[in-house]
Image (cartoon, grey):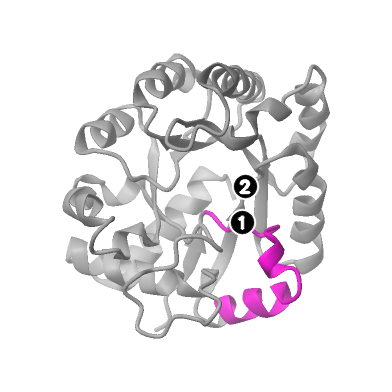
Amino acid sequence: MQMLLADSCFNITHESFKNDLGDVLDVANNEGVEYFFCPASKEREIDDLIQLSESYKKNIFCSVGIHPHYASDLKPNTIENMEKYLSNQHVKAVGEIGLDYYRNFQSPEIQKKCFNAFLELASKHQYPLFLHHREAFDDFYPMIKDHIDQVPESIVHCFTGTKFELKKFLDLGLYIGVTGWICDPKRGEDLRGIIKYIPIDRLLIETDAPYLIPKNMENKPRNNRNEPLFLKHIACNISELLNIDKALLADRTTKNFKKLFRI
């Protein structure tokens, strides 16, 4: 029986999908991937995200937000402009928002200002948070904790942190998104060691395509582009690490996806 899978992070507007998106979605469907969440990273993407969600009719859902890499895009009228999109049936979360002190493309002060603005937006309208966190725990965690009681269940996507950070996020009731990072024997070593601490009812799986192609795949595409197609490979790796049936993992994570995004 084919697994029914949900990709909780697919960067659908990336230019690498411009010429073959229909084929990318079709081959993913053929491998059991039937749901896609596609977060916004900047304001100018949102119209495209909604248009793609509506035109492909492939259970594509999206969000409104500004990734911390683009935090300086926040202008006085940004939140008001984005607020109007929340009534669209395809918009299911506020994100991708958060803090990233690993790359530091924006100053911490600018990142925190942008992050807080969207935390307030999500709190006001009761929308889930789709969160980005990398090496910024001391600032990130208090900001989330201050708002967590004001928003529905939310997710830290592409988790690559420590066991301590994982526990703190789980204590807040957050879902944890796991990518193909788990398939990297070197970079993913720590994550492979702590994934057992994620309760199955808190786990979502994602490709973060076109990024983070699973390193341990035998037949990678020549362009090295990650796709939702490879979610099945990620799911199989996780099921082995957790010592559970892959069909059960697929079923539970897809149910988690639907619950989180209220589908």
Does the residue at mark 2 contact the one at mark 1 (Cβ under 8 Å)?
Answer: yes
Q: Amino acid at mark 2?
A: Pro
Q: Is residue 214 above or below residue 191?
A: below
Q: Quick one: label 2, few (<14), some, or many (20+) residues within 10 Å?
A: many
Q: Amino acid at mark 1?
A: Asn
Sequence-first tag of 2 and 1? 1
Which picture quadrant has residue 69?
Answer: top right
Q: Is residue 14 in the magenta section?
A: yes
Q: Position of residue 258 (x, y in %)?
A: 52, 52
Residue at the spot x=58%, y=28% of the render? 106
Along the line of sight, the residue nearer the viewer: 193 or 251: 193
The magenta-colored residue range is 9-29
Residue indicated by mark 2: 39
Q: Which mark is residue 11?
A: 1
Along the line of sight, the residue nearer the viewer: 54 or 114: 114
Q: Is residue 181 above or below residue 126?
A: below
Q: Is residue 60 above or below residue 199?
A: below
Q: Which mark is residue 131?
A: none
Q: Position of residue 94 (x, y in %)?
A: 62, 35
Q: Can you see residue 14? A: yes
SS at circle 2: loop
Q: Quick one: label 1, few (<14), some, or many (20+) residues within 10 Å?
A: many
